[in-house]
Image (tube, helix red, strand yellow):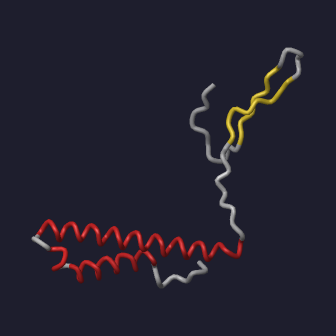
């Protein structure tokens, strides 16, 4: 039996079936996976900060790689000519992602 489009709030769907003796037994048709993070409360802000820094680094590196490829396609050895501006712009992109002005505890 297929269950189509279950709402997010539904945790489990159980059907009662009768066996040969006439007793009803529950049969689980759908059970939601437990996606809850297991983490101690004091470490949550630290994890959030580390994740934010890692995301910002990914954004900066991806931005630099895109600019590097664009510079290389424009001129021969264009990546070396545009190295400093590309690094500065990629760094700004990373800083925007990091949102330095926000406090870590938010």
List x then y, in percent, for residue 49: 55, 76
Quadrant in the rendering for residue 19: top right
Which quadrant, please, contains the N terminus?
top right
List x then y, in percent, for residue 98: 45, 77
Quadrant in the rendering for residue 50: bottom right
Residue plotted at (85% across, 24% down) = 24
Q: Is residue 66 above or below residue 53?
A: above
Q: Nearer the viewer, residue 3 or 77?
A: 77
Q: Is residue 95 above or below residue 72?
A: below
Which quadrant, please, contains the C terminus?
bottom right
Residue plotted at (83% across, 27% down) = 25
Residue plotted at (61% across, 80% down) = 105
Q: Is residue 19 above or below residue 25?
A: above
List x then y, in percent, for residue 31: 69, 40
Q: Nearer the viewer, residue 104 or 51?
A: 51
Horizontally, residue 67 falls left or right of residue 42, namely left
Q: Is residue 12 above or below residue 75?
A: above
Residue plotted at (66% across, 60% down) = 37
Horizontally, residue 10 falls left or right of residue 91, namely right
């Amino acid at each position: 039996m297929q269950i189509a489009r279950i709402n997010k709030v539904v945790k489990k769907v159980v059907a009662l079936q009768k066996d040969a003796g006439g007793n009803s037994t529950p049969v689980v048709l759908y059970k939601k996976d437990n996606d809850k993070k297991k983490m101690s409360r004091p470490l949550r802000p630290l994890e959030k900060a580390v994740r934010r820094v890692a995301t910002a680094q990914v954004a900066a590196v991806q931005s630099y790689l895109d600019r590097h490829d664009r510079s290389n396609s424009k001129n021969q050895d264009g990546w070396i000519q545009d190295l400093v501006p590309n690094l500065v712009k990629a760094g700004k992109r990373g800083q925007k992602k990091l949102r330095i002005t926000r406090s870590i505890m938010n």
